[in-house]
Image (spheres, rainbow, N blue to C red):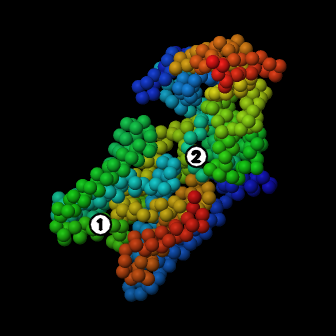
Amino acid sequence: MALSEQWCFYGFYWGEDPMPDTRLIVLFLVLIGAGVTYLTWGLAGPIAFILKLRAIKLGGLLVVGAAVGLSTILFQTISRNRVLTPSIMGFDALYVFVQTSLVFFLGGLGFSQLPRQHLFAANSGALILCSLVLFTLALRKTRHDIQLMILVGVVFGLLFRSLSALMQRLMDPSEFAILQSVSFAQFSGIDRIELLASFIALGGVAVWLVWRTSVLDVMALGKREARSLGVAYDRVQFEILCAISLLVSVSTALVGPIVFLGLLVSALAHSLMQTHRHALLLPASAMIAALILVAGQAGFERILNLQSTLTVVIEFTGGLLFLILLMRGKIQ
Amino acid sequence: MITVQGLYHQLGGNPVLRDVSISLPSNKMTAIIGPNGAGKSTLLDVIARQSKLQQGQLYLDDQDMTQIKPQDLALRMALVSQQNGIASRIRIRDLVGFGRWPHHQGRPQAQDLDKTAEALDRFDLNGLGGRFLDEVSGGQRQRAFVAMAYCQDTDWLLLDEPLNNLDLRYATALMVQLRALSQVQSKGIAIVIHDLNYALNYADHIVALKEGQLAFEGAVSDVANSENLTGLYDTPVEVTKTEKGLFVQHHLMAAS
């Protein structure tokens, strides 16, 4: 029937797609290709050992990519703003603040002797706890006004940044060097247990998302419209904030702050999918983020021979891509 | 019938509604009129459960409205808000389709698509279905939101200043549509409206608010006279009965 084909074309069916979107399939295949390339490119020496190392790193890239992609789209849905990412709430600032305090108070030696998995648990726990306290208090005080809550987050981010800067000034240069190495995202030396824990957290959020995907579409319409359609807006908003907090906290605790990626990823996902439906946007954004990280890390390791940082690689190529798309009017 | 009893409401410490008791008759069109800041939109918000009921009683067909679950209420009452922000980047067809959400909760059936198509047709949006909401004019967007509420297929339709942004043709067309919906499909309709000519000629029932209190309420034929309206707006308003209906003159000040 011509009419129903038209409906499908505009992405009206949600929930029960006749078949998965072709763009998602292509994206998935490209991602697998990138993963295999990353694992096997320039393989020499003790193959089993190198493969194991690379597999863990690849797992980290995929988990973090998915977390960044999902959390950015979710944050943009509740803030109803396409140029915001969760990092505006000061998650990275809080993370750096916690690390700085640890180095400051325990000393460089004490910090490097901390058991890794305890540190990971403490980091993610602190981030989740702080964000939940912020959400509940700020949302109650601002009568569930998300814009005001974001402002509160910005102010706290500034506070944490200034406190970190103060402690870094007072610090011994060698301790500062240790601190610097944990203040940027690093994918080398990811712990297996940490990776597993992050993966479980991500899986939990993913299951919740699949269950709630069509409510998310309604949430994107705005508070009044969603309420008029019978959605308990305030409660779902809080659920989404919890999911964001979990995703950002776990991925930050795993590899460190990645502040630059979310915006690029959401813009790419929107321009590729051209839809308001979260059932398509969320997987696309998760896979695009993972793809950028895997490709970036591969280029960084094999082409640049670790001569730069992943941040630079991704910001340069990603920024270039962003500008090209912007100029060609593909991003709106 | 929607019954409001002894409603008090305050926003940021300021009383907005004081002791308002009204009833909106089923199957009829009620116009809520009054000067700026009279509390019209707040009243509509409280009835539509967008704002929490602070003090007073609210009944929908003798059922306490605070006891009705939001999902169930969405099947009985639809609201068209005033548009201030542009919603997410979404096609008009999909926006209108969201009106069916309370019925299918994310899994649209054939009848949902049929109803959406009918709503697009009824509100003259057929050629615009594939356009994005932020790429059409304010009036077209307004019509899309009304079509979405129509799609919700409820007994009650509440509209907050739906004529904003509409030109003569579409404003009249919308009022004709709403009147038809109340008469043919027996929907109860409540509309916050500033244009008295539309209000008096299309509505059956008038609720007039002034400074948060009920000024007068009743059938148009009973209460819509020059004296009441002049007192309501503190501006000379003259209602004349013509062959085609009531004509309200208020835009020319009396010669001084």
Q: Quadrant of residue A64?
A: bottom left
Find numbered disc 1 in the image and state the secondary structure of the residue it sits on.
Answer: helix
Q: Quadrant of residue A188?
A: bottom left
Q: Residue at x 20, y 59 (%)?
A: A167
Label 2 environment density (alpha carbons within 10 Å; few <14, some 14–19, many ≥20): some
- Give the spatial CA distance, label 2 vs label 1: 41 Å
Q: Between residues B220 and A295, which one lies in front from this camera angle?
A: B220
Tell whether A330 sits left or right of A192: right
The disc at residue B236 is none
The disc at residue A182 is 1
Q: Are marks 2 and 1 in contact (CB under 8 Å)?
A: no
The furthest residue to the front? B256
Label 1 environment density (alpha carbons within 10 Å; few <14, some 14–19, many ≥20): some
* Residue type, label 1: Val
Q: Residue at x 42, y 64 (%)?
A: A260
Q: Residue under circle 2?
A: B86
* Residue type, label 2: Ile
Coordinates of residue A299 in the picture (x, y in percent)? 45, 78
